[in-house]
Amino acid sequence: MTRTLILLLALAPAGTAHAQAVKLEPLSEARLRYESVDQDGLAANAEAQTLRVRAGVEAKAGRWSALGEGQGNLAIVDDYFDGLHGAAARPIIADPENIALVRAQLRYAAPAFTVTAGRQRIGFDDERFVGSVGFRQNGQSYDAVRAEVTPLKDVKVDLAYAWSVRTIWGVDGAGARQQAVSGDNVFANVGAQTPVGKLSAFAYLVDQDEAAMQGFRMSSQSYGARLDGSKPLGKAKIGWQLSYARQSDWHRNPNDYSADYYLADVAVDFGGPRMGAGYEVLGADGGLALTSFQTPLATGFKFQGWADKFLVTPPDGIRDLYASAGWSWKAVGPLKAVTVTAAYHDYRSDRAVRSYGDEIDLLASAKLGKVTGSLRYAHYNADGFATDTDKFWLQLDWML
């Protein structure tokens, strides 16, 4: 960290040593959530009512800023297995009680160059490979140095080196669920705006260097490209995503493998009603090794259904064919940003194309003042993988 601060000071232009007015901006947010899980094969259901509170401050002076933020997560109702405590006879709800420093960063921001050092949140593109796991109460942050450079108009180079990943398991994390996972993680993303959308090339080198959790089996190098664009279509708007990546073992991973990732997604928004469909594949190794494409640093809840059955890709890989439909209103009476959505997923293995099961996800959300409320439901119907599972969430988010 000392070397990082020296580097930042060296980058400062002449004149920054002069006193500048410091502006302080408070940071505060809270989330109250009830979650229940009914999972076949376990003796009891799980119920969790948790309250997460985050508070901090950001100080700004010219191009410099410093930010510190802490959080606490309290289990008001704790009839669940949080991955560390409680009866494993109940389904897991991965929100253990926790008190932590989640961000402590120093940033220097010039018009075409920004560098951020310290504990921070990092997300690239749609967070399929590197994300902050924002849905879980504790989230995920990184002890890292990140540089964002704009060398040309509509071109951005985004580079990060992270030596520690602060996981969702919090201060009591141990064994296979560590508080922090060390390693030499390198993330690189170069994006350019084109007539058909943002075209990105990326390289994500994930180093899970924890022998206690055999995390090195998740160490990998992924190289690929992504296209993300949209355009008006009459009174509607059509959006698309295309992505491909090739992954292989890296660093201490004992598995000699390679696997492919594909994504094709299209969505149409009619200014109220909207619909979409997509196909995502996390492939299996083409040889004899029972190894598949893994994304251990992703915001996994955003992908392959909310029942969280595929946070770790099965050895035979997974193919997810999905479709969604919904409706949104800018206002309904006093409520703002009202949204209802339904999605369906059909899951199959990549190797041998066997059925895993299917899933239905439902969501309704609205905003009233500074509070956003949401109801969410997921039903996973097992057919050859895992067990039938129903999950329900009632959530209130408040932000200063």
Image: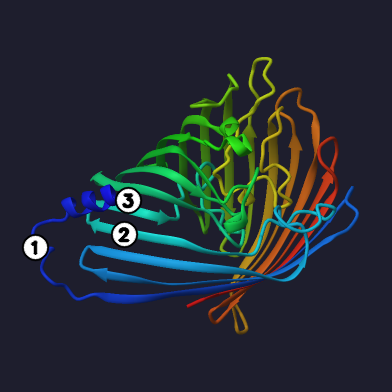
Nearer to us of marks 2 and 3 is: 3
In space, the residues marked 3 and 1 are separated at their CA atoms by 24 Å
- Residue that numbered label 2 is attached to: 106
| Mark 2 / mark 1, whichever is N-terminal | 1
Query: What x and y, as percent, mark residue 135?
Result: 60, 59
Q: Is residue 389 above or below residue 334?
A: above
Q: Which mark is residue 15?
A: 1
Horizontal placement of 138 versus 4: left or right? right
The answer to whether residue 194 shows anywhere in this view is no
Q: Secondary structure at mark 3?
A: loop
Q: Which mark is residue 355?
A: none
Amino acid type shown at disc 2: Leu
CB atoms at circles 2 and 3 under 8 Å apart?
A: no
Q: Is residue 400 above or below residue 7?
A: below
- Residue that numbered label 3 is attached to: 1
Residue drawn 69% across and 38% down?
320
Q: Secondary structure at mark 2?
A: strand
Quadrant of residue 254 within the rendered picture: top right
The answer to whether residue 97 shows anywhere in this view is yes
| Few, some or many residues within 10 Å of mark 3 (<14, 14–19, 20+) | few
Query: What x and y, as percent, mark residue 332?
Result: 63, 79
